[in-house]
């Protein structure tokens, strides 16, 4: 067993969150409560870092690392534990971070999502955006959506990913998984192959910049169903992040979103008093009342309308959190700590209704 496997297994056994290998620092692990512990006193030098890299990167991967400056991927130890990893440069020195890739599989029906979400997965076109901060459950919903489509529809589905986090199998539907940076060097090449294999559904692992956002809009405007994730906390932040990516194309992006956006769900996981996790989310779905506001980029008005029309199925986190606090299922301090909009939550909690 190599030294990397031994250290990763140790980190996993100690239920730590992540392990770090940084040049000129001792290797250390970080626990879920934020505590950091050095594994040894010795600092790692450049040669030791490069020897570690040889364990999990191929010659081709190492060339790519030097070319683009980072590597993302999975590594499986000799006892079949899988870890997500990132290798990158900082201050012209190499750093490596690994954390457990615990991918829990849920069916879409186990996730307590609105019925209209599942109905939309059966549509032939449109855009579904699953948003949230890190460790908020968005990947779980994304994977469950893909599994649902593959198991229930006679379609072809293509994924666009930076690295393969979960391998999907053909069922009623056929799946292709394209890796940007390995199978194809850029988004333009991915778009070209998608146009040739002609999938019915495209799932984009994460919208990380304007190229990915443009891809999602282009494909949904062309009549495909597109599902993607976005790292943003709350529906307002999700729209604002897309606006920031778009730059001087902001007006066009919002106009296109008003035409294709079917669902935007953005939530987080909250610890309950019953020692369970509860997914609390904002939920927008396509409605003619909102399209003019989205086209204008008037996101505050969209949020206010969602509050007014929550009895129609729209949902904002604040009302769900207030109900859970009243039932004693979530502590107020936990809610305020993790809420997308803590100031708005304070107002809702103070209101008599």
Image: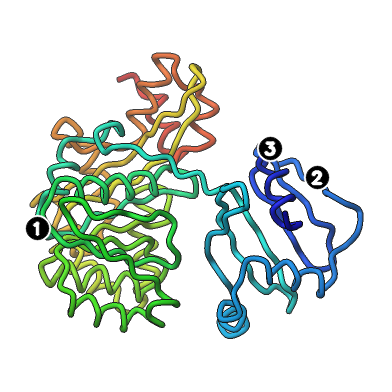
Q: Is residue 73 positioned above or below 189 on the image?
A: above
Report the front residue among 89 and 317: 89
Where disc 1 sits, the SS reads: loop
Circle nearer the N terminus (1, 3) = 3
Q: CA distance from mark 2 to mark 1?
A: 51 Å
Q: SS at mark 3? A: helix
Which-is-in-front pick, marks 1 and 3? 3
Rendered location of residue 126, percent (x, y): 15, 59
> Measured from the top left, where is residue 58 in percent x and y?
59, 75
Give the vertical position of 297 relative to 134 (above or below): below
For the point 37% across and 80% down, which residue is it? 184
Residue that numbered label 1 is attached to: 124
Along the line of sight, which residue is nearer the eye, 155 or 79?
79
The residue nearer to you, when weighing 4 against 191, is 4
Q: Real-space Cα distance between discs 2 and 3? A: 14 Å
Counting from the top left corner in percent of width and height, residue 307 is at: 24, 37
The answer to which of marks 2 and 1 sits earlier in the sequence is 2
How far, Cα to Cα, is label 1 from label 3?
A: 45 Å
Q: Tag 3: Cα neighbours inside 10 Å, few (<14), some, or many (≥20)?
A: few
The image position of residue 54, as x and y in percent, is 68, 71
Q: Is 108 positioned to the left or the right of 276 in the image?
A: left
Q: Which mark is residue 37?
A: 2
Q: Mark 3 = which residue?
A: 13
Q: Quadrant of residue 136?
A: top left
The residue lying at 83 percent from left, 62 percent from top is 25
**Neighbours of disc 2 within 10 Å: few (<14), some (14-19), many (20+):** some
């Amino acid at each position: 067993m190599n030294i990397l496997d031994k250290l990763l297994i140790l980190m996993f056994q100690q239920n730590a969150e992540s392990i770090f290998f940084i040049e000129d620092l001792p290797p250390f692990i970080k626990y879920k409560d934020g505590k950091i512990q050095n594994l040894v006193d010795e600092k790692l030098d450049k040669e030791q870092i490069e020897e570690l890299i040889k364990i999990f990167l191929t010659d081709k991967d190492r060339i790519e690392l030097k070319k683009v400056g980072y590597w993302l991927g999975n590594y499986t130890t000799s006892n079949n534990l899988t870890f997500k990893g990132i290798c990158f440069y900082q201050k012209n020195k190499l750093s490596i971070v690994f954390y457990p890739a615990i991918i829990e599989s849920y069916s879409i029906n186990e996730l307590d999502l609105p019925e209209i979400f599942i109905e939309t997965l059966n549509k032939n076109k449109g855009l579904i955006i699953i948003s949230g901060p890190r460790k908020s459950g968005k990947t779980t919903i994304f994977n469950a959506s893909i599994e649902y489509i593959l198991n229930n529809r006679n379609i072809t589905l293509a994924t666009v990913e930076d690295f393969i986090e979960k391998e999907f199998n053909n069922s009623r539907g056929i799946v292709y998984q394209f890796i940007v940076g390995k199978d194809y060097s850029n988004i333009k090449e991915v778009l070209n192959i998608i146009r040739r294999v002609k999938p019915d559904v495209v799932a984009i692992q994460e919208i990380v910049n304007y190229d990915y956002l443009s891809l999602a809009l282009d494909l949904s405007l062309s009549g495909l169903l597109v599902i993607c994730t976005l790292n943003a906390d709350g529906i307002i932040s999700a729209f604002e992040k897309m606006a920031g990516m778009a730059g001087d194309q902001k007006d066009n992006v919002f106009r296109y979103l008003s035409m294709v956006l079917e669902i935007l769900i953005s939530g987080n996981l909250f610890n309950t008093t019953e020692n369970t996790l509860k997914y609390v989310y904002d939920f927008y779905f396509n409605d003619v009342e909102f399209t003019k506001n989205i086209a204008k980029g008037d996101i505050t008005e969209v949020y206010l309308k969602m509050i007014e029309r929550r009895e129609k199925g729209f949902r904002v986190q604040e009302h769900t959190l207030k109900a859970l606090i009243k039932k004693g299922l979530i502590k107020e301090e936990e809610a305020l700590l993790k809420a997308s909009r803590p100031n708005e939550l304070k107002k809702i909690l103070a209101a008599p209704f």
